[in-house]
């Protein structure tokens, strides 16, 4: 589960059909484990003769700029045909799409750094920003305080997973409580038509020509 079920809900809401009766799923999403494992896969995927477009979704964690530099340097040194000069000087708020020519032919690389290509965080940070208009005032802030108080009382979740705890706490107070993340989007407990949700869907559409 996870990213491969969350992304289809976001893009379908933006009017991008996820499945085609004749062709099946238009984009194959593969969870790839740790950040280092994702990095290792990029040159292999772009060197494939059957895969023209590769999109990468990674968490910024503590530093967007650090992730950006790491991926720029890694891709520029391991992907034939992709040079550092083809990368913008800084992370792109609307998501990165680079077209280049490789020995195998035309290739396209896309990058989205969660949550928004600007701030530190992860996919759960992104999902917090899909809070629907009209949600009870202060409820998310209460979820934040509750998680911080739980930490003070010895709750064992680690600090880096604070945003995970917050979004699941917030969802525990919805009706019905405790939906899984993708289902919360499907049932509109989380609203993909917020500005950030639409920006992500627009990047996905540009990347895959949908």
Image (spheres, helix red, strand yellow):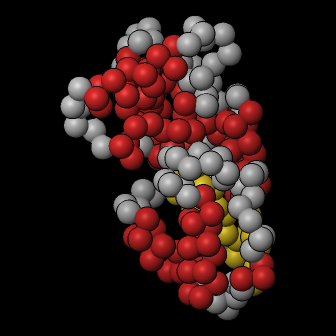
Q: Is residue 191 left or right of residue 30?
A: right
Judge by depth and name the residue closer to the eye, 86 or 146.
146
Residue 20 visible in rendering: no
For the point 49% across and 53% down, the residue is 61
Which residue is rendered at x = 78% and y = 78% of the image?
Answer: 86
| Of residues 162 and 34, the one drawn nearer to the viewer in this rendering | 162
**197 with respect to 142 (left or right):** right
Tally of marks:
0
Q: At 33% from the left edge and 23% from the top edge, which residue is drawn?
A: 149
Q: Quadrant of the N terminus?
A: top left
Q: Is residue 86 left or right of residue 51?
A: right
- The x, y position of residue 38, in whole percent, is 45, 68
Q: Residue furthest front?
A: 152
The residue under the point 40% across, 70% down is 37
The percent coordinates of residue 102 (x first, y second) are 69, 86
Decide if residue 196 is in sight here.
Answer: yes
Residue 175 in which image quadrant: top left
Coordinates of residue 87 in the picture (x, y in percent): 75, 74
Residue 73, placed above or below residue 65: below
């Amino acid at each position: 589960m996870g990213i491969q079920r969350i992304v289809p809900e976001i893009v379908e809401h933006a009017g991008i059909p996820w499945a085609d009766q004749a062709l099946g799923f238009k984009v194959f999403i593969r969870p790839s484990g740790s950040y280092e494992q994702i990095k290792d896969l990029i040159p292999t995927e772009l060197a494939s003769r059957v895969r023209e477009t590769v999109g990468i979704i990674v968490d910024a964690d503590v530093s967007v700029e650090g992730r950006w530099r790491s991926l720029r340097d890694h891709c520029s040194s391991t992907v034939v045909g992709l040079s550092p000069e083809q990368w913008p000087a800084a992370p792109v708020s609307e998501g990165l799409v680079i077209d280049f020519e490789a020995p195998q032919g035309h290739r396209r690389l896309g990058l989205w750094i969660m949550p928004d290509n600007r701030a530190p965080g992860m996919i759960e940070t992104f999902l917090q920003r899909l809070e629907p208009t009209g949600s009870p005032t202060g409820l998310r802030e209460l979820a934040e305080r509750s998680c911080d108080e739980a930490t003070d009382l010895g709750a064992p979740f680690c600090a880096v997973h604070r945003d995970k705890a917050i979004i699941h706490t917030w969802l525990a107070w919805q009706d019905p409580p405790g939906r899984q993340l993708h289902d919360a989007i499907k049932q509109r407990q989380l609203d993909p038509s917020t500005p950030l949700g639409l920006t992500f869907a627009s990047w996905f559409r540009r990347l895959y020509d949908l």
